[in-house]
Image (tube, helix red, strand yellow):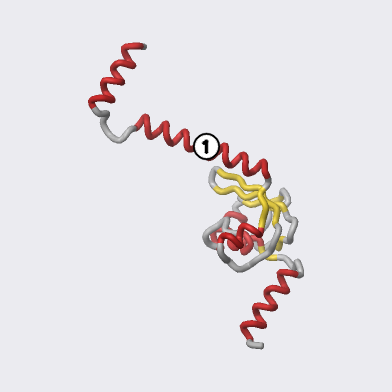
Amino acid sequence: MSRINKQKQQDKTALADNAGVRIDKWLWAARFFKTRSLASEAVSGGKVLADGQRCKASRTIKTGTVLRISKGDYVFEVTVLGLSDKRGPASVAQTLYSESDESRERRETLAESLRDVRLLERGIRGEGRPSKKQRRQLNKLKEEW
């Protein structure tokens, strides 16, 4: 057996034995963060809670650990289903965790409200000066008040 195949076999058995993976590596492998350093900064900054507690980037997580991940306005509450320290395709990354239904609903409602706010801001600011038609509509609206 070649050295590369032996290394792959060892990696699979280490993760299959539920040995645990560093939380920053797992967050990177599960594609919550683009780089491992961003994941590490988020963990050390208190944006990631493991089982309700702040942790260091070197903390090992195991299957069943509940993570609360804050990314900007969005908050993910996920349960770790699989372990990986290698970044793979997005389809594989999605099998590493399951997001709670409440978390998914909160994110969807937040996304809708943010979308509405963006549309309102764009409508208020517009795209420069109002056209002749828009100016007439504004004047008509002002007269009705």
Name the residue type under label 1.
Answer: Glu
User: Does residue 59 appear to the left or right of 127 in the view shown?
Assistant: right
Front-lying residue, 5 or 41: 5
**Figure check: 51 above or below 126:** below
User: Does residue 16 appear to the left or right of 142 in the view shown?
Assistant: right
Q: Position of residue 72 (x, y in %)?
A: 54, 46
What residue does disc 1 label? Answer: 112
Q: Position of residue 38 (x, y in %)?
A: 54, 58
Q: Name the image quarter holding the C terminus.
A: top left
Residue at 73% across, 74% down:
13
Q: Quadrant of residue 106?
A: top right
User: Does residue 113 appear to the left or right of 27 in the view shown?
Assistant: left
Considering every residue shown, the one lying at the far top of the view is 144
Residue 40 can be seen, yes or no: no
Q: Quadrant of residue 5?
A: bottom right
Residue at 66% across, 60% down:
23
Residue 105 can be seen, yes or no: yes
Secondary structure beneath label 1: helix
Q: Position of residue 125 (x, y in %)?
A: 34, 32
Front-lying residue, 50 or 123: 123
